[in-house]
Amino acid sequence: MALSNAEKVKRYRERQKAKKQEALKQPTPPSEVFQKPFFEFFPVDEQLGSAYAQSLELGGIQPLHFEDNTGPETTTLDDILDFDGKNDAANFFGEHAGTSLGKAEVLIGCLLDAATDLAGWVNAYKKSEIRARIAEIETSDLSDAEQKRAALTEVVRLNKLLDGLDKEIRWPLPVWKVDDPTS
């Protein structure tokens, strides 16, 4: 069956969004504009007291420190192998990966993906639990008028919680990737 124009546009937009998400995990190629290495701009002593490090530590995650100008290929925990079974992390991140700025950009994209995925799992868990409580109320004995009134009030409250979980939030972030129109 042929796709309608609206379905084609929707699929196209989904593909574009997926490409954009993957691009967030790729470092920006070096340019003559960004000459000072990022690790010199954001030294370790500043990193330790930053909201970046403190927030990760509060979440139980050891922050990645930018101590030199190495790129994301030096810190990945995944085995990124080529067809011959050799480490291919450098090629995975592209030929311009090996800088502290590239490492920071890849980290931002990965943290955003991780936060989005974890938020989705927490959202699904909460919806499941709320629906289970509603089902318990529906199968409970509601012969007493007072119990029925309390149960209906609770179902209304639980349904409002479900409605709240159907929404998405927008979190303002500073732009960290720009496309150079001259390159």
Image (spheres, helix red, strand yellow):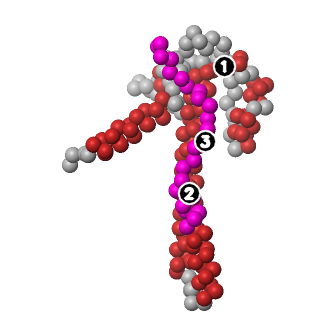
Which residue lies under the disc numbered 2? 165
- At x 55%, y 67%, the residue is 159
On whether residue 178 falls in the magenta region, the answer is yes
Out of 87 and 158, give the one closest to the viewer: 158
Which residue lies under the disc numbered 1? 38
Determine whether, in the image, residue 118 is placed left or right of residue 83: right
Nearest to viewer (mark 2 / mark 1): 2
Percent from the top left, x then y, of residue 85? 44, 26
Disc sitting over residue 158 in the figure: none
Dot 3 and dot 2 residues touching (CB under 8 Å) = no
Instruction: Residue type at mark 2: give it.
Output: Leu
Disc sitting over residue 171 in the figure: 3
Q: Main secondary structure of the magenta part?
A: loop
Q: Residues within 10 Å of mark 3 (few under 14, many from 20)?
A: few
Out of 97 and 179, give the one closest to the viewer: 179
Residue 118: in sight, yes or no?
Answer: no
Percent from the top left, x then y, of residue 67? 70, 21
Instruction: Residue type at mark 3: give it.
Output: Trp
Distance between the alpha carbons at the discs numbered 3 and 2? 16 Å
Residue at the top extreme of this rendering? 32
Out of 93 and 17, give the one closest to the viewer: 17
> Which contiguous range is marked in magenta?
159-183
